[in-house]
Image (cartoon, grey):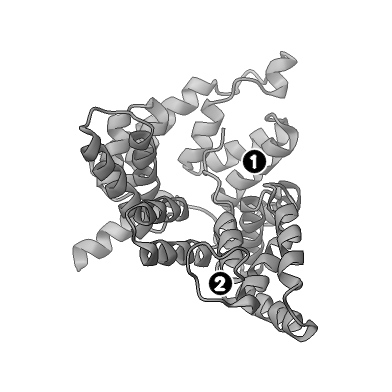
Amino acid sequence: MKKSLFTALLIIAFAHPASAELSSEQQAAKIQGITLYNQYKAVSATPFLTVAAEAGDHEAQYYLAESLRGKNHYINPEARKWYEASAAQGDLYAMIQLGRIVKDLCTLSDNCPPNQKMPVEWLNQAEKIALPKAIQGDAEAMYIMYELTLDESWLEKSAIAGHALSQYWMGVIYKQGKGFFLPWKREEEVEKWFKASAEGGNPRSMMEYGAILFEKGDIEGYRHWNEQAALAGYASTVYGYGSDLAHEPDLYGFPFDIIKGYALIYLLGELDGGGGLREMAESKLQKIAEKMTSEQIVEAKEFAKEWKATQAPLSFFPDKLNL
């Protein structure tokens, strides 16, 4: 038990380097900012993230830099400032993004400060920090080493150590045909990694594993993982799950629950930052509403309000290291 606790503390310390302690208001702003960022609402996320970033939170600084980069389609001085502030506190994701800069405003104008670090220096610094941790068995550090080197042996080691995102990517690369396996062995490997990742909480893997179970005739297993992905807030699955519950259409034998189905589709209306789901949801909502009374629609909207207050927020779950 002591060893497990110590390991957990090490993981927390790695994932969250020393950073400023936030007030309750600043923490709430950070959470709201990251939630909006994960819904592809970079512009809306910026003021919330700024509150926590200015208070010194390295993770908020990273996501603020990501939001600014996404909004401008390049790294402007403001985005670089926040990447560097985050990296200065030991955030490896910020170091990697600084190391991946191909072009930014100062490079294009040939007006970079003389003391500005070169991209390769940031990558070297990230590796210097991550490699010892990876050698000691830290799963996230192994994943970072994969991102730094693109050496898939690090990805596999990270997956074996239990990193859910690495497990997802192992499933993806084997599904795409990489590696040498007998046909049935490849299927076993793909299923193994998606199952492990799904059990580790990765919603994309939940859907991949659910699809594998469906192909094997385990419809109940598919329904289970579909529901779990929706409970995790995975926006694409919330759309499918809501449609299934409302039997629009009924493809997988979900019990008919038009109130819950309408409510889940209704929630997707807030996704106005991109991803294409809002438009699909509006069309689907009209079809479901045609089968409902006005009283049922009112009840469904109340259900949606309760779901939003008690379940995970909607998210597209973009990779933290976006290109």
Q: Position of residue 263 (x, y in %)?
A: 66, 73
Residue ID at (43%, 54%)? 202
Q: Is residue 15 visible?
A: yes
Q: Residue 221's quadrant in the figure?
A: bottom left
Return the residue at label 2: 311
- Please determine whether, in this image, residue 103 is positioned above or below residue 301: above
- Alpha-carbon neighbours of circle 2 within 10 Å: few (<14), some, or many (≥20)? few
Q: Secondary structure at mark 2?
A: loop
Extreme residue toward the right, this view: 294
In space, the residues marked 2 and 1 are separated at their CA atoms by 28 Å
Extreme residue toward the bottom, this view: 295
Who is closer to the viewer here, 323 or 129?
A: 323
Q: Which one is earlier in the sequence, the residue at label 2 or at label 1? A: 1
Who is closer to the viewer here, 107 or 208?
A: 208
Q: Which quadrant is the N terminus positioned in?
A: bottom left
Any mark on residue 65, and which?
Answer: 1
Residue ID at (57%, 53%)? 57
Any mark on residue 55, and which?
Answer: none
Q: Is residue 47 visible?
A: no
33 to the left or right of 319: right
Q: Amino acid at mark 1?
A: Ala
- Please determine whether, in this image, residue 219 is positioned above or below residue 322: below
Q: Secondary structure at mark 1?
A: helix
Who is closer to the viewer here, 205 or 126?
A: 205
Q: Position of residue 250 (x, y in %)?
A: 55, 65
